[in-house]
Image: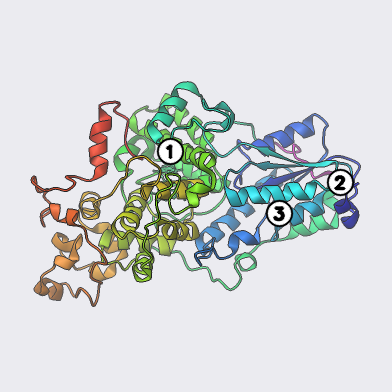
Amino acid sequence: MTKMANGNGLKSSSKRLVLWFRNDLRLHDNAIVDKAKRSVASGDCKEVLPLYCFDPRVFQRSEYGSPKTGVHRAKFLVESVMDLRERLRSVGSDLLIAVNKPENVIADLVGDNGTSVFAQREVTHEERVTESLVEGILAGSERARLELFWGATLYHRGDLPFKSNLRDLPDVFTPFRNKVEKQCSVRSLLSEPRAGDLPLGDAANLPLVKKMTNYEPSLKDILPGVDVPDQDERSSLSFRGGEAAALERLRYYLWDSDLLSTYFETRNGMVGGDYSTKFSPWLANGCLSPRKIYHEISEYERERVANKSTYWVVFELIWRDFFHFYCEKHGNSVFYPGGPAGRRNDWNNDRDALRRWKEGRTGVPLVDANMRELLHTGFMSNRGRQNVASFLALDLKGDWRVGADHFESLLLDYDVCSNWGNWVSAAGLTGGRVNRFNIVKQSKDYDKAGEYIKLWIPELRKVPTQYIHKPWEMPRSVQESSGCFIGQDYPNPVATSKAWETYNKGGKKSEKSKPYRGYYEKRSVRKEKKKSNFEMYG
Ligand SMILES: Cc1cc2nc3c(=O)[nH]c(=O)nc-3n(C[C@H](O)[C@H](O)[C@H](O)COP(=O)(O)OP(=O)(O)OC[C@H]3O[C@@H](n4cnc5c(N)ncnc54)[C@H](O)[C@@H]3O)c2cc1C
């Protein structure tokens, strides 16, 4: 008998299973659910206690002073957890919910006849520390243990064509993609539980279990003193957490709208819900399995059309896998100032510039519009993320970790590997190529008429298109007629780059212009195209 069991009177005649949900808030294609189902079916256990803990450490302030989880993501998370409970109830189970550290809660749930705790394995520092703390607690009992399962990626960790410690995992995407596509296949989906597959058993009557299954979490419990803002009407999508909403979005994007078939052409947009899949918040919380998306796309390709667009969503999911495995390989160095490349730390700490970047007041419209969208909604397009990250790290030379931390705080789809991996890459610290974006060129290419800029920067609404990408060049008379005085209604740019001058005011490219004709991405596409039609920076 364990100390924990004695303390809490959780006596039971059968072996208990605690399903500790983390970033896997779904019933479909879920490794821990599948294993639990099989343990029950084989008679190995009769009590399954699904559990979710709102860990207070995840809601504290970061070392940079930001709330680690901002209000938009916290709301999405509560919705996701509540949806999981609904789905568990629909199969005759329930979800125990606590606002407490997992190691404390799990200690209280250990039964006196043996307990296994199943959880999805994570790869980054803080998550692994929590795993060790749970392990430490269970080590006090001979008959309790933690079992970790792989479940976050498209390709299973165990199927990778690399050494088990990932030392030979390529540090750049293309060789990684080539190898996994050639040598691995995506596993089939794990089946969902049916009624009775996950019985609470006798444990259902325990006071502690009753208390936790009756508990309805609210945002006030996990983020005390923080009010939930109304949804901004300019939001690209009305994101709602949970597996049900995730599957709805999947159905909409593939089957109801056929948007999948044009993804390649639309994916660089910035306005509205349809330009890209918007699967990321659900993927990050595990409400949607990447394998589910993959198999659904295969079905779509069989039934409707298979083209570059249908492939490209899978390609993006491989990017997601790449950063997951990259972060596992490189460990804590992805959080260091010099990144895995170990470059000397020469990032500046101009607080005013960093603050202006965060608030969307740099005076560079494409950057500001994106930063304001993030602040108000918790979302930003991939195009936007690439640009604001490049601007911070390579134009302002600001400490990229402040940027990554700000994203961590605000993003609805924050995923430790996708975020820190993309940031370390944007800062040029992976050892691979450095993608410095020409912000003005990008603005002209992807927001030609300034529709996106005007949506998020009302001060610029009357500015003629000719000046919308570089308002600091507006003559005084135009500032007057558009009701926007630079330095007064809208700031002077915190930084500019010589490269931005390489395009004429009308938006035409100056043929003689140096120092980087076109932005890096285009050049790399041309180079990569020689190898494959499907190669491009994601
Ligand atoms: C600085 C920076 C930080 C980022 N932080 C995150 C993050 O915290 N969480 C996150 O999910 N994505 C992050 N991304 C990647 C990407 O911007 C988002 O996944 C994408 O914008 C989400 O929108 P979507 O679901 O419509 O993507 P789609 O274009 O529809 O792509 C489909 C899916 O592929 C995956 N994906 C696409 N691009 C990438 C990429 N570059 N890296 C990893 N996965 C990718 C995502 O899971 C996405 O949902 C970041 C990118 C940058 C440049």
Q: Position of residue 61 (x, y in %)?
A: 56, 65
- Which quadrant holds the C terminus? top left
Q: Which residue is drawn at 53% across and 48% down?
A: 332
Q: Is mark 1 within 8 Å of ligand 1?
A: yes
Query: Magenta region, mostly helix, strand or loop?
Result: loop
Give the residue displayed 59% in from the left and 67% down from the top: 223
Residue under label 3, please give it.
Answer: 102
Q: Would residue 12 appear left or right of 53 to someone viewing this image?
A: right
Q: Quadrant of residue 227?
A: bottom right
Number of the front mark, 2 or 1? 1
Which region shows up in magenta? 193-201
| Comes first in the chain, label 2 or label 1 | 2
Q: Is residue 285 left or right of residue 279?
A: right
Q: Is residue 426 magenta?
A: no
Answer yes or no: do the residues labelled 3 and 2 have beta carbons within 8 Å? no
Question: Where residue 233 sits in the image (x, y, percent)?
Answer: 39, 63
So how many labels did they put on this image?
3
Task: Indicate the quadrant where residue 458 lies.
Answer: bottom left
The residue at the far front in this view is 344
Q: Which amino acid does label 3 sit on?
A: Pro
Q: Distance between the residues labelled 2 and 1?
A: 45 Å
The residue beneath circle 2 is 202
Q: In the image, is residue 314 above or below residue 182?
A: below
Q: Which amino acid does label 2 sit on?
A: Asp
Task: State the residue position of label 1.
Answer: 319
Kindly tell me whether residue 538 is visible in this rendering.
yes
**Identity of the residue drawn at 53% across and 63% down:** 63
Q: Pointer 1: residues within 10 angstroms few (<14), some, or many (20+)?
A: some
